[in-house]
Amino acid sequence: MAVIQVYAEQLRASSQPGSTNPANYEWSHILSFPVDTIVNIGFALRPLKWIRFATGVVTGTQGDLSASRNSLVAVDYNSSLPTDSLNLYYHVSVAERAAMFPLDPLFSAEAITDSQASFQTREGDFRSRVAARDEWAEDECDAVHMVSFKKGASYMRAFSSGRTRGQIIIDDINDTRNGILVRKDKRIVLGKNLAILKTPNFALNASDIIATANSNDELYIYTPFRRRRTRSSDTKTFGSNHCIRVPDDKSDWPPDFLFDAMYASAVLFHFHTQKTGSWREKFYSAAKTSQQVEFEKLKAEEALKKVNADAGAAARDERAAQRTSQRDGGGSDTWKEWACEQLLFWPYQNLSPSQLEAFGQAHRQQASVKECSNWLDRDQLRA
């Protein structure tokens, strides 16, 4: 089976993001595209252009594909896919390489969440805001978070800044721009088996995807990432690249980088290699998810509790030592008196106040009876 293997320059283990020194980068195999899959699903009319776009949104850069590792000789993007396996190298400029911010390999690990999660966080208007923006009935679709709600505000801030090179910063995971309406049966596959491609972009025009479209048409195109079987037969049907409905007012519409991120998520889900695993440590150290933030908060609280518990235990030990010292310093008779008091009190230590009162009353009655008995005995002796 013919496979197109894509290589891109990635940071060496000892290097940090932002470097302009070519020596800090090495070629790594990051994506593998089976030719049969690309043809059968029909991602684009010009599949090499699509591979260029897919590589760009995954790495967070704009570059060109070449059959040569050492020099950029761009492939013929209008040609058909090869019948034999081929290695392609994704070349970028020095500035692009320094600004690289690849997609988090765990971006889709936490499923894209619907607005039901936001109801649990006192942000119940997220769904209604997204539905109002898209002018669509709420009961027909689900409002989903394009960056998972579970990732939280800290992650959203770092992710938006990194992917847009500081041009767009979104502080709230429930920001309307982070939401989009999808059919209820499509929600769970968005970002894995389904994505939305926005044209035009750095690699593709609308006519590269849909033959009847104009090159410069601004379209948002549903792209399925796997073949589907019809229920009535074994005939396989392929994605038809439907366009989604876009509101007239796009002031709160998701920015392009969010559509690119969802698309890159689906590309990684189906075509990734193990070489992408190191990206999280390199580029996402500041992008903490809400679970990580909460975990660190709990760790800090537990540490504080331990410090307080240790301090309390030390204080109790000190007081016990002082009491022991006072008892020992008072002489053996004092110690014996204290020990006797403890022994006398021992049978009654677990009694409640009411039980102690009843016991005392009974004891007083017994003492009275005994005293009366002593008087009678004395009277009898006198007689």
Image (spheres, rainbow, N blue to C red):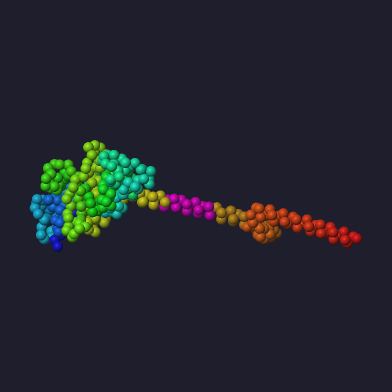
Q: Is residue 302 left or right of residue 353?
A: left
Residue 244 visible in this rendered orientation of the protein: yes
Q: Residue at x 17, y 57 (%)?
A: 236
Near-viewer residue (58 or 92): 58
Percent x, y of residue 314: 53, 54
Using the image, determine if residue 291 lies above or below residue 253.
below
Residue stretch rendered in magenta on the structure: 299-314
Percent x, y of residue 99: 22, 46
Q: Residue at x 20, y 57 (%)?
A: 230
Near-viewer residue (120 or 50): 120
Report the residue that reaches farthest toward the bottom.
Answer: 1
Percent x, y of residue 33: 17, 57
Near-viewer residue (322 or 28): 28
Q: Quadrant of residue 237?
A: bottom left
Residue 295 among those drawn in magenta: no
Residue 307 among those drawn in magenta: yes
Helix, strand or loop for the magenta stretch, by majority = helix
Q: Quadrant of residue 83?
A: bottom left
Report the residue that reaches farthest toward the front.
Answer: 232
Q: Is residue 380 left or right of residue 115?
A: right
Q: Quadrant of the C terminus?
A: bottom right
Near-viewer residue (140 or 125): 140
Q: Residue at x 80, y 57 (%)?
A: 371
Q: Residue at x 9, y 50 (%)?
A: 78
